[in-house]
Image: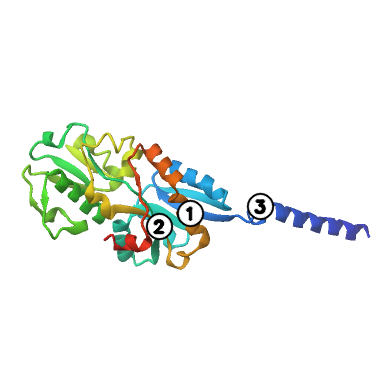
Amino acid sequence: MKKILTATLLLLLVFILAACGDDSNAQGKTTVTLGISGSDTTIWDYIADKAEKEGIELEIQTFSDYVAPNLALAEGELDLNAFQTISYFDEFVAEHNIDIVPIGSTVIAPMGLYSDKYESIDDIPEGSQIATPNEATNMGRALLLLDEAGLITLSDDAGLTGTAEDIIENPKNIEIVPMVSGHTPRAMPDVAASIINNGVAVDAGLNPTKDPIARESDTAKPYINLIAANAEDADNEAYQKIVKIYQQEDTAEFIIEHTKGAQIPTVVTVDELVDYQ
C-alpha cells in the first residue's frame, strides 16, 4: 500500500512540475521570434512590451548582416523579420527562390553620404573615392543618392539597381568603391566620403539626421522597410497583431523620438508595398 501511495504522489508531482514548466501555454501566450539587422533593439523592445499585453511574447534575435535574417526566416528559424526595404526584399527573394512575403510596412530610413574630411559635397575634390554598399539594391540606391546630390548623372535606364556602368556624367571623376554595407563606416578614413545605410550608421555612432553631408529625399520612396513572414503564415493572427502594434500612433511617436527623426514611420498596405518597385 505504501508503494502504491508513493508512486501516486510521484506521478502527481510530475504533473504539477509539467504544468509549472509550461507557463506560456497556461497563460495563453504565443511566442513569436523576430529577426532584425543591427544591435539596437530599443524600438522592438518597446513593441515587445506592448505585445505582451496582447498575449504575445516577442523574442528578438539580432544579426550583423542583411542575408542571414532572410535565410533564417525561410528555414523556419524565425517567425518574422524586420530589417529590409521592399526593393532589397524583391531582389533577394528572386535570387534565392524563397517563399517569404511582406505583411506590413515599418519606416523609411534615408541613406546618407558621410565624410570625416569634408563638410559639404562641394568640397569633395576631383578624383575622390566614395565608398558604397555592394549589394545590388543598396548600390543602386547609393548611386541615386549621388545623382540627387549632383556628383554624378545616371542614365534613364539605371532604375533602382544601377551600377557604375550606368554613370553617364562624372564631372569630378569620382571613383566608386563598393564594399559590404557593414564596412562602409570603417572606410571613412580612407575615402573622401562613404554612403552608409541608416541602421549601419546608427550602429557606428553616427547621427543619420545631423551627420550626412547629403541625404536621400524623394529617392527614398522605393525603400520602405517591411515586416516579412513565410507565405503560408502571412495571415497568422499573432503576426498581424505585431504589424498593428508597430503601426500604432504612440509607436510612431516613440520611433521619431528615439531616432531623432532619422527614421520616418510609414503605413502603407501590403498591395502598395508590392507596387513599390
- Would you name the residue on which mark 2 appears? 104
Image colouring: rainbow
Q: Amino acid at mark 1?
A: Ile
Q: In the rendered image, which quarter contains the C terminus?
A: bottom left
Which of disc 3 and disc 1 is earlier in sequence? 3
- Where is residue 188, by image quadrant? top left
Q: Nearer the viewer, mark 1 or mark 3?
A: 1
Q: Callout 1 environment at 10 Å: few (<14), some (14 to 19), or many (20+)?
A: many
Residue at the location (26% across, 45% down)?
111
Q: Looking at the image, do the residues carrying marks 3 and 2 touch, with CB atoms under 8 Å apart?
A: no
- Residue 242, labelled with which disc? 1
Q: Are marks 2 and 1 in contact (CB under 8 Å)?
A: yes
Q: Looking at the picture, how far across and down is residue 257, in whole percent? A: 39, 37
Q: Residue at x 34, y 67 (%)?
A: 97
Q: Report the front residue among 81 and 222.
A: 222
Residue 6 position, x and y percent, is 87, 56
Q: Secondary structure at mark 2?
A: strand
CA gap, disc 3 and disc 2: 30 Å
What residue sits 41% from the left and 45% below the top? 252
Per the image, label 3 sits on a secondary structure element best described as helix
Label 3: which residue?
23
Query: Along the line of sight, which residue is nearer the eye, 165 or 241?
Result: 241
Asked whether the viewer can see residue 71, the reply is yes
